[in-house]
Image: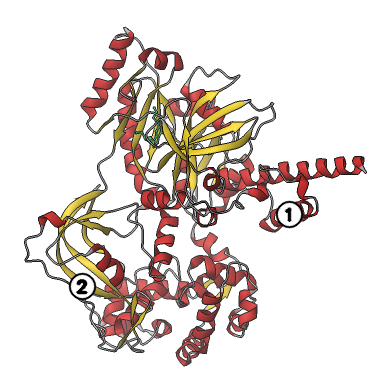
Amino acid sequence: MEEEKEAVKQYIEDLRKKIHYHNYRYYVLDEPEISDAEYDRLFKELEELESKYPELITPDSPTQRVGAKPLTEFGTYEHSIPMLSLNSVSDVSDVRDFDERVRKFLGIEGGKIEYVVEPKIDGLAMELVYENGVLSVGSTRGDGTTGEDITQNLRTIKTIPLRIFSDAPPLPLLEVRGEVFMPVSKFKELNDALGARGEKMFANPRNAAAGSVRQLDPKVTASRPLDFFAYGVGRAEGKEFSTQWEVLNYLRNIGFKVSPLIRRFEHIKDVIEYHEEVKAKRDELDYEIDGIVVKVNSIELQERLGTISRSPRWAIAYKFPAREEFTRVKDIVVQVGRTGALTPVAVLEPVPIAGVTVSRATLHNEDELRRKDVRIGDTVVVERAGDVIPEVVSVIKSKRTGAEKEFKMPDRCPVCGAEVIKEGPIVRCIGVSCVAQLKERIKHFASLRALNIEGLGEKVIEQLVDRKMVSDAADLFFLTKRDLLKLDRMGDKSAQNILDALEKSKHTTFARLIHALGIRHVGEHTASLLADNFRDLESLRNASYEDLVSIPEIGPEVAKSILLFFEQESTKELLDKLERAGVSYEKKEVAEEEERKILEGKTFVFTGRISMPREEAKRIVEQFGGRVASSVSKRTDYVVAGEEAGSKLERARKLGVKVINEEEFRTMVR
Ligand code: IVH
């Protein structure tokens, strides 16, 4: 009996190890080795065994991420080593001063100082305590000395290991420090969902992360898309680090996500150059960074430099220009979307924000507008995060003169004059032939991620609708050159290009076609789920409510919306017309691969340590039409260099071949 129990225990332990490993592959490396179904099977098996043998459940089991009961308040947690803050600068001259100060202090004015540069993640600093490799406490930075114990919330973040990942015996004690953040794309989705439910929205990804991590109920935190980058250690018993670089690599090796943007430089001028490089890439990243952090690499030198008033002398935050600006609301207008939703939009005194001129900002919906109390004439703070639509964050009420005007949502559609209804916080035009909705539906149909009809821009679509040349998206395919030539500023060549693009778009994928239809609540992701689960449009059209909700991730609201869409007479007409036009689709993304041969004729060489396996890198290059070679020559177009790249990198530099890092490579093929 005992023996049997021991065997079960061992089996469960092996299962956990496997699951931890696959978690790591999936969430941290973003390189799964097994299918979702296989993962689910392992997970389920563990759950079943644990419910049979509850005495064998351990807190570091992957099944135990969420489970704790809601708290009434958080406890406090005292950091054993204070969590410092950083002095920040935004001018080049201050960075040079920093470098000079460091040298002077160390008495090595002429010598070399190595710096490590990391992105400054705009999130919240946390400390994670691991005892014998198992996560025991997770806390906020607080005032640097005492933070809040939010262990049960941090446990729900998939990129925070519950157990250190290593072959070597774990350290008796390890404190890991890093930043919790919310990816920009996920923030946008969360805000859209909160807005649709009439709940308070977050001003930016950082606030969303802060609000999510401080929930008393860990289930709420678990439902929020949080992520974690590690960048430092506190106590590490039984381990000596000699450099920050070593710390970062150690953290990466034991299962933490470490930013791929970290670099090492020997000259401050390279640090300054890298600041520019990262700044230029800022909008492409799916997380907000507000600058770079420059740290003296040597721990010994760090210790010699010490700290002054809670900031280290050995590090500095070199900030990017702010994403927030003040400006004035000239007017508030209403925009009618594809589903008829009326969105209040602030028309602004144009203002440059981190390189982009912003002249409009969304106010989301009436409730948000009231909550923020935005009035025409107000001075407001506008924020732009990544490529998310700029938004009005707050009103500077002290600047009010009394001349500001309150805005009232119209009770009729400003475009077609039809009645509006209120669905929660959303005001919706119910006009069936509202041209604003039609224009937006067609724009969506033709957009890059739907049918990708190149050259069919907004202006053309608007004219086509205004001149009643199309009454739904399918009519596009029946346009002739004579029709198109009637439009403003349309030459023979452009007209032909549009016709060619229309012809090309007729051959698409099932997922794109579903997405293009513009069914409410069916975005790109849901469209591809549907494409995976139905044979063709006919079977999707005939799907029952049960068929739909049996697909994981498809809930009642989405299912109802799909049913409603296919019940419409106008949908039937649209689909018939699409068929008559000869629109066809393939189940797989073959068409997409063909049209995205963006690496055609390009030769790549990979060298050094990168996080994806070489076969994977090769597959990606080939998928986009490129070729992978094993040695660098004059004909090489790109060398993708990872950690510890050696002779190939040298050769590339000598031959003047373009060298990029993994992050840049990923951006190329995204
Ligand atoms: S190091 C030297 N590294 O910036 C110890 N901080 O003002 C200070 N932060 O509270 C922390 N990314 O929230 C460090 N790569 C990074 C960081 C980083 C973001 C934040 C962190 C900290 C604040 C310092």
- Please state which of residues 261 and 610 is positioned toward the viewer in this rendering: 261
Residue 567 x %, y %:
52, 89
Residue 256 in view here: no
- Please state which of residues 590 and 303 is positioned toward the viewer in this rendering: 303
Residue 570 x %, y %:
45, 90
- Please state which of residues 279 and 158 is positioned toward the viewer in this rendering: 158
Q: What's the residue at 41%, 15% (across, down)?
A: 303
Residue 567 in view here: yes
Q: What's the residue at 78%, 45% (across, down)?
A: 12
Disc 1 marks a residue whose amino acid type is Glu
In the image, residue 578 above or below residue 106: below
- Residue 263 appears in which quarter of the rendering? top left
Q: Earlier in the sequence, mark 2 or mark 1?
A: 1
In the image, residue 492 above or below residue 41: below
Q: Residues within 10 Å of mark 1 (few under 14, many from 20)?
A: some
Q: Which residue is mark 2?
A: 333
> Is 615 left, or right, of 228 in this rendering?
right
Name the outermost residue toward the bottom: 569
Q: Which residue is mark 1?
A: 47
The alpha-carbon separation of the residues under discs 2 and 1 comes to: 53 Å
Q: Check disc 1 and report its element: helix, strand or loop.
A: helix
- Residue 118 appears in which quarter of the rendering? top left
